[in-house]
Image: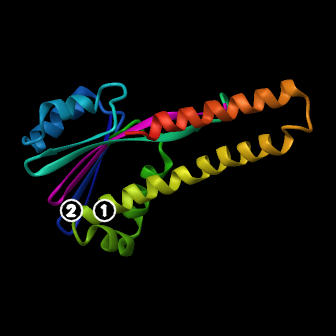
Amino acid sequence: MTTTILTHSRVTWTNIVQPTLEDMEQLKSRYPHFHPLNLHDCTSELEFPKIDHHDGYLFIVVHLPRWDSQERISRPSEVDIFVGKGILVTSHAGILKPLNELFARLQQDEALRNDVMGHGASPLLYELLDEMINYCFPILQKVNQNIRHAEEHLFHEETEHILRDIAIVRRDVIALRHILRP
């Protein structure tokens, strides 16, 4: 739906938000060596996390937790990444803050853009993955806090209330494990 391109030095980051089949056709014409199955993966629901090695590029599918405050559970959000010499392509739903914020910061801050993109696509990929992993820490801390709360109140509150809290914590741990496990 929205494709934004950021080029600096010899690196081009193509960021596709809510990818469509038309977006994938444009990507295929720009990068004809991208495998058709990888392009298809970008428009399908949720793929399994994976890394595919092809001549000239890697295709990476990453799942990250996104906190659903209404349901009080982590939901998976997928980022599809193509990385090769001088190119990084991201394809995602547009709801992950770390990816959106990094792209915006790189657009606005020339010094940061030079630092992150001035040495090739690999440092850019590293920065992106680092930002996304750091995004997970508050979610993991919240689950840990809920575990501690349940432990502290295990013998001091009504059984029904504490059992509900334990069930919520268990659900959170299972959801995170399912999202983050390759």
Q: Residue shown at 79%/43% (left/top)? A: 151
Mark whose residue sits in front, 2 or 1: 1
Q: Quadrant of residue 49?
A: top left
Residue bearing mark 2: 11
* In the rendered image, the vertical position of residue 72 relative to residue 33, given as above or below: above
With 111 as the anchor, is 57 left or right in this view? Answer: left
**Kind of residue indicated by mark 2:** Val
* In the rendered image, the vertical position of residue 19 relative to residue 52, given as above or below: above
Q: Position of residue 10 (x, y in %)?
A: 17, 66
Q: Secondary structure at mark 2?
A: strand
Q: Secondary structure at mark 1?
A: helix
Is the C-beta separation of discs 2 and 1 under 8 Å?
yes
Q: Is residue 15 magenta?
A: no
With 97 as the anchor, is 32 left or right in this view? Answer: left
Q: Which residues are magenta?
A: 72-90
Q: Residue shown at 38%/55% (left/top)? A: 129
Mark 1 crowdedness (10 Å alpha carbons): few <14, some 14-19, many ≥20? many
If the image is split into quadrants, where does the C terminus sit?
top left
Q: Position of residue 44 (x, y in %)?
A: 30, 25
Q: Position of residue 15 (x, y in %)?
A: 31, 47
The answer to whether one can see residue 135 in this image is yes
The numbered mark at residue 124 is 1
Looking at the magenta stretch, what is its main secondary structure?
strand
Q: Is residue 85 magenta?
A: yes
**For the residues marked 2 and 1, what is the alpha-carbon distance in whole angstroms?**
9 Å
Q: Residue shown at 91%/29% (left/top)? A: 158
